[in-house]
Image (cartoon, rainbow, N blue to C red):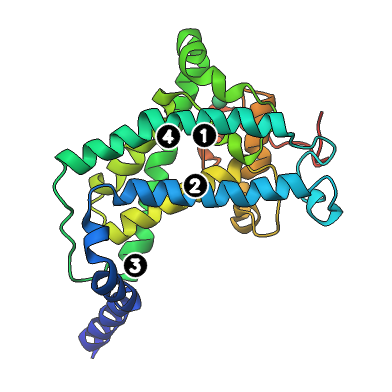
Amino acid sequence: MLDENNVTDSQSQSLVLQPLWDYLLQNHHDFLRSPPFPAILSVTTYFILVGFYTVLDLLAPTWPCINRYRLHPDRPVTWPNIWTTLGVTVYNHVFYIFPATVAQWLWRPPTLLPREAPTFLSFVLGILGCMVLFDFQYYLWHLLHHHIPWLYRTFHAIHHQYNQTFSLVTQYLSGWELFSVGFWTTVDPILLQCHCLTAWSFMVFNVYISVEQHCGYVFPWAMHNLVPFGLWGGAPKHDAHHQRPGTNFAPYFSHWDWLGGTHMVPSPSKSSV
Ligand SMILES: [Zn+2]
Ligand SMILES: [Zn+2]
């Protein structure tokens, strides 16, 4: 009886994502298995999210119902802010992401897509595992690039030119930082032997989190409002990092900053400048 229940449980777990996976295989098989698909997915997600928040930034000065959710309601995002950050973002995409995507197209064999979807449990655990791993990798990278002056000057200082975050600051980065983040996001699901659906979902989630972290808004659905015990960093803590660069190094969770003594909760008053 117990075995039958276990079999039924595992079958129902498998079924949750199978219809979605079947739909994707039947309708988009060739596109999904093409080597540049993950890069196209990440870039598209990034520009949709940044476009959404940039529209909010432009409306916020005249729309109080939007401005009230901003971390710095008295400091509007200006057109020069938008052009400068957009310029570096486009530069990075043209000179780093596009060549890397073309190289994958030319030299990587197409992905073999399994017929079976991941079970719901392996999907959730896979994303969680990738998050924990990525969080640790970026925490170390970030700490090193703040504590070694040459690394800071050469690779990370550009990201700190803005002490107030807004969505386009997310990829206002050096090519090396963009490469590091892209490398771990690609390699971590492989290391954890995740299903490709899990890997792609992690990539989209990672882009969503990195933009949310920089968006400069605190909406009710913000991740740090959903995750209990202050375990999640989120937009206020990362905005604090841009103002006090010796604090809040981790990208997702707060535990490494707790352990390292670098955790800082910004004051409740939204605008601290
Ligand atoms: Zn940042
Ligand atoms: Zn930093």
Given contact means CB atoms under 8 Å apart, are the residues at marks 2 and 1 in contact?
Answer: yes
> Disc 4 and disc 1: Cα gap in Å?
10 Å
Mark 2 or mark 3: name the one nearer the start of the chain. Answer: 2
**Picture coordinates of residue 44, whole percent (x, y):** 45, 50
* Mark 2 neighbour class, 10 Å CA radius: few under 14, some 14 to 19, many 20 or more: many
Q: Residue 186 appears at what percent x and percent y?
A: 31, 43
Identify the mark at residue 121; answer none if there is no mark: 3
- In the picture of the structure, the residue carrying the numbered disc 1 is 171
Give the label, 2 or 3, closer to the camera.
2
Amino acid type at mark 2: Tyr
Which mark's residue is nearer the viewer, 4 or 1?
4
Percent across and percent down for residue 162 are 66, 26
Q: Which residue appears at 71% of the width and 34% of the height?
A: 79
Amino acid type, label 3:
Leu
Q: Which numbered mark, 1 or 3, is in the foreground of this view?
A: 1
Say which residue label 2 marks: 46
